Image (cartoon, grey):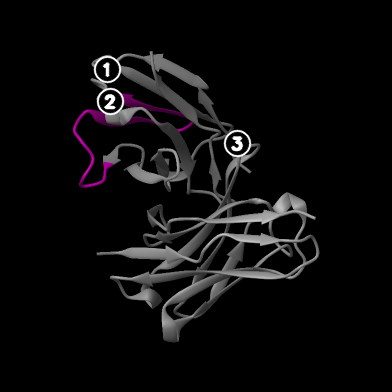
């Protein structure tokens, strides 16, 4: 069974750094892109970017370029999303999802809630 | 960026009725690379339809996707109580990929 299990909820202060994870199982990690999606009540679902763990090729939405870093560790079949300096506006639920080829995202993680508040 | 506009924002219907959800794109969706997702409270989105009209294997026959170019529709032929949720369309043909704002399907 394909599964993407994300790390637990985080509460952080503005300016702090954060790295959340997405551990996959049930398929070959290096053969599929992993995407990240942000969900907020105000803006809904937003596509943030993708990584191909096979060669670490990474693509970002212009809205998130420079704001976050997407990475992956093949040795433990885990993808990451990180911030160097959080803002209150980063408060959201973040989902990772497996991408089928260069197409749609079929299986999604359980989501990580990030709350940034002073 | 391709903007996807879903209508209506909220749809109030009763079990057994037919639901028609619309998704309109600001420009043509490349190769009709349009997906529909269902999301229930506290859960991740669940893929229903890809390529505008292809269903994933575990999706009931009452769900049908149609459309091309800039106009797409998700139809649920006879609503089951488990179908009441929020539905999102998503275009993955042109980067940056984008989502509609969602249609909430609620019980009347």
* Element under disc 3: loop
Cβ–Cβ below 8 Å for labels 2 and 1?
yes
Residue A84 visible within the image: yes
- For label 2, count other residues whose C-alpha is less than 10 Å away and answer few (under 14), some (14-19) or many (20+): few
* Disc 2/disc 3 C-alpha distance (Å): 31 Å
Residue sitting at x 38%, y 62%: A101
Q: Vertically, is B107 above or below A77?
A: above
Q: Is residue B69 magenta?
A: yes
Q: Chain of mark 1?
A: B
Q: Position of residue A33 (x, y in %)?
A: 44, 67
Residue at (74%, 70%) from the top-left corner?
A84
Give residue B25's quadrant in the image.
Answer: top right
In this rendering, the label closer to the viewer, 3 or 1? 1
The residues colored magenta run: B55-76
Q: Which residue does the image show at 31% across and 14% down from the upper left? A: B14
Q: Return the disc, 3 or 1, that comes first in the chain's sequence.
A: 3
Chain at numbered mark 3: B
From the top left corner, tell me how far across and down residue A41 is, in percent. Answer: 61, 38
Nearest to N terminus: mark 2 or mark 1: 1
Image quarter hosting the C terminus of chain B:
top left
Q: Residue at x 23, y 16 (%)?
A: B16
Label 2 to label 1: alpha-carbon separation: 6 Å
Q: Nearer the viewer, mark 2 or mark 3?
A: 2
Kindly identify which residue carries mark 3. B3
A38 or A116, which lies in front? A116
Q: CA distance from mark 3 to mark 1?
A: 31 Å
On the image, the x and y values in percent for residue B37 come to 40, 40
Residue hosting label 1: B15
Q: Secondary structure at mark 2?
A: helix
Per the image, the residue denoted by label 2 is B81
């Amino acid at each position: 069974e394909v599964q993407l299990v994300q790390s637990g909820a985080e509460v952080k202060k503005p300016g702090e750094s954060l790295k959340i994870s997405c551990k996959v199982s049930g398929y070959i990690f290096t053969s599929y892109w992993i995407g990240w999606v942000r969900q907020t009540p105000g803006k809904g679902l937003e596509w943030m970017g993708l990584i191909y763990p096979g060669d670490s090729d990474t693509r970002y939405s212009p809205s998130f370029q420079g704001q976050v870093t997407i990475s992956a560790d093949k040795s433990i079949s885990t993808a990451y999303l990180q911030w160097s300096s959080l803002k209150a506006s980063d408060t959201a639920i973040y989902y990772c999802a497996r991408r089928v080829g260069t197409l749609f995202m079929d299986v999604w993680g359980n989501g990580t809630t990030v709350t940034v508040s002073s | 960026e391709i903007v996807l506009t879903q209508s209506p924002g909220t749809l109030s219907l009763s079990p057994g009725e037919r639901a028609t959800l619309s998704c309109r794109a600001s420009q043509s969706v490349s190769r009709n690379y349009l997906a529909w997702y269902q999301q229930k409270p506290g859960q991740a989105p669940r893929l229903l339809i890809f390529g505008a009209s292809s269903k994933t294997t575990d999706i009931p026959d009452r769900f049908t996707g149609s459309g091309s170019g800039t106009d797409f529709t998700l139809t649920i032929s006879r609503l089951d109580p488990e179908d009441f949720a929020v539905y999102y369309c998503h275009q993955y043909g042109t980067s940056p990929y984008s989502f509609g704002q969602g249609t909430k399907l609620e019980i009347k």
